[in-house]
Amino acid sequence: MPARFKVAPTKNNLLQLQQQVRFLDKGYSLLERKRELLTRLVYERLANYRTLRKQSKALLKQAYHSLAITHMRMGRAQFKQTTMGIQPAIELRILPMSSLGVQYLSVSAKKRPFQPLGLFGTDASFDQTRQLMTELALVLIQLGEAETALRRLLVEQRKTQKRVNALKYNVIPRYQNTIRYIESTLEEEERTTLFQIQLLQDQQSRN
């Protein structure tokens, strides 16, 4: 059982503690609500993360298989020379985002218009490899954003859980125990006072 605070058992202290515990109860309710929302958001993000991870694995296998074929057919020197003149295939836009007070970056990515290369010595598999690599990059960008957001949400969810537990099992019970102690002490003092008054009245009535 949590210990009580060492305060004088006075009416004024009782009123202050009762006011403080009401404030803590409200804070506990808000934190519990936040914890529930964070937990729900974590599960939603986790489902999306697993889907993206599965997609990235499949695309990674296809893209690198196609890359190996293209590299083999074109040769290392020709492949390197061809890729040096290619413009970036993706446009990125990075914005700060916040969910339930958790800060992370939102990455918006889209493909640029695809420009086939008609260079001499380019194999037919080259364009397919470019397409697959672009698709892979888009999924990996989404996966990175999802993983970062999920990790930060999990950290905040655990922090909130610790605060909820601290209030529920330690802080609020200490206030409640102290309030009960003061109430009991004041009641006992009141009974003692009433008893003494009664004794005085009895003595006066006898006299």
Image: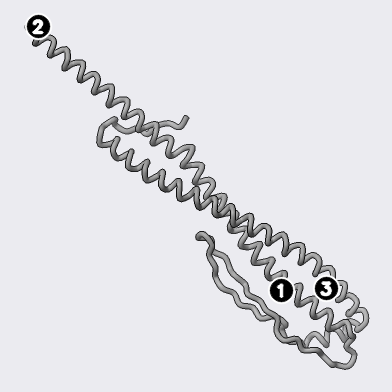
Mark 2 residue element: helix
Residue occupying the point 9% across, 6% down: 206
Identity, as a three-letter code, of the amino acid under mark 1:
Leu
Q: Which residue is mark 2?
A: 206
Q: Which residue is mark 1?
A: 138
The local crowd at label 1, few if under 14, some if 14 to 19, many if 20 or more residues have their Cα within 10 Å, is many
Choose between 65 and 199: the one closer to the eye: 199
Measuring from the top left, give residue 153's x and y in whole percent: 58, 57
The local crowd at label 3, few if under 14, some if 14 to 19, many if 20 or more residues have their Cα within 10 Å, is many
Say whether disc 3 or disc 2 marks the residue closer to the N-terminus.
Answer: 3
Identity, as a three-letter code, of the amino acid under mark 3:
Ala
The local crowd at label 2, few if under 14, some if 14 to 19, many if 20 or more residues have their Cα within 10 Å, is few
**187 over 49 or under it: above or below:** above
Measuring from the top left, give residue 59's x and y in whole percent: 80, 69
Q: Which residue is mark 3?
A: 63
Residue occupying the point 45% across, 32% down: 2
Say whether disc 2 or disc 1 marks the residue closer to the N-terminus.
Answer: 1
